[in-house]
Image: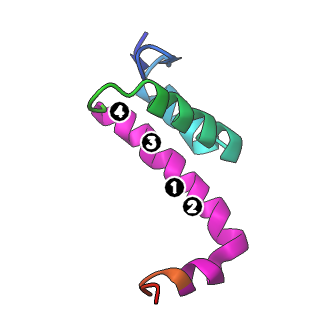
Amino acid sequence: MPAIFNDLLEFRDENDLDSVLDKMDKTLAIKLLEIALDSCSANFTIVESHVIFKCLKKLKENGSNSRNGELQQSEGHSPQ
């Protein structure tokens, strides 16, 4: 059974992992990021990088729903 993040997250195959990532909520995204960062040794595998990307994308979706205008205003403007 494949595993990532120093064998802390196991999955049957890549389809199984993709299914979990597609259905994840904000809580699971944060938990997976915690696992990834806690187990980080030097470099992430391509699968681990994919999981991190999907988690960050999920958190961005949730954050942009409530603060979209605020985030857009702060992007590209340097503090004075």
Classify mark 3: helix, strand or loop. Answer: helix
Q: Earlier in the sequence, mark 2 or mark 3?
A: 3
What is the spatial separation of the Cα atoms under label 1 and label 4, in whole angstroms?
A: 15 Å
What is the spatial separation of the Cα atoms under label 2 and label 1, in whole angstroms?
A: 5 Å
Vertical placement of residue 17 versus 56, above or below: above
Identify which residue is drawn at 39% across, 41% down. Answer: 50
Q: Earlier in the sequence, mark 1 or mark 4?
A: 4
Range shown magenta: 45-73
Identify which residue is drawn at 35% across, 33% down. Answer: 47
Disc 4 residue crowd, few under 14, some 14–19, many 20+, Cα 10 Å: some
What is the spatial separation of the Cα atoms under label 4 and label 2, in whole angstroms?
A: 20 Å
**Residue 47 numbered tag:** 4
* Marks 3 and 1 in Cβ contact (< 8 Å): no
Residue at which label 1 appears: 57
Q: Residue furthest front?
A: 80
Q: Is residue 70 magenta?
A: yes
The answer to which of 68 and 15 lies nearer the viewer is: 68
Identify which residue is drawn at 31% across, 32% down. Answer: 44
User: Viewer-nearest of labels 4 and 2?
Assistant: 2
Residue type at the position of mark 3 = Ile
**Residue 52 numbered tag:** 3
Residue type at the position of mark 2 = Lys
Instruction: Answer with left or right where residue 79 lies relative to residue 23.
Output: left
**Residue 60 numbered tag:** 2
* Marks 1 and 4 in Cβ contact (< 8 Å): no
Instruction: Answer with left or right where residue 74 lies relative to residue 24.
Output: left
Residue 51: give x, y in percent of width and height: 45, 38
Residue type at the position of mark 4 = Val
Classify mark 1: helix, strand or loop. Answer: helix
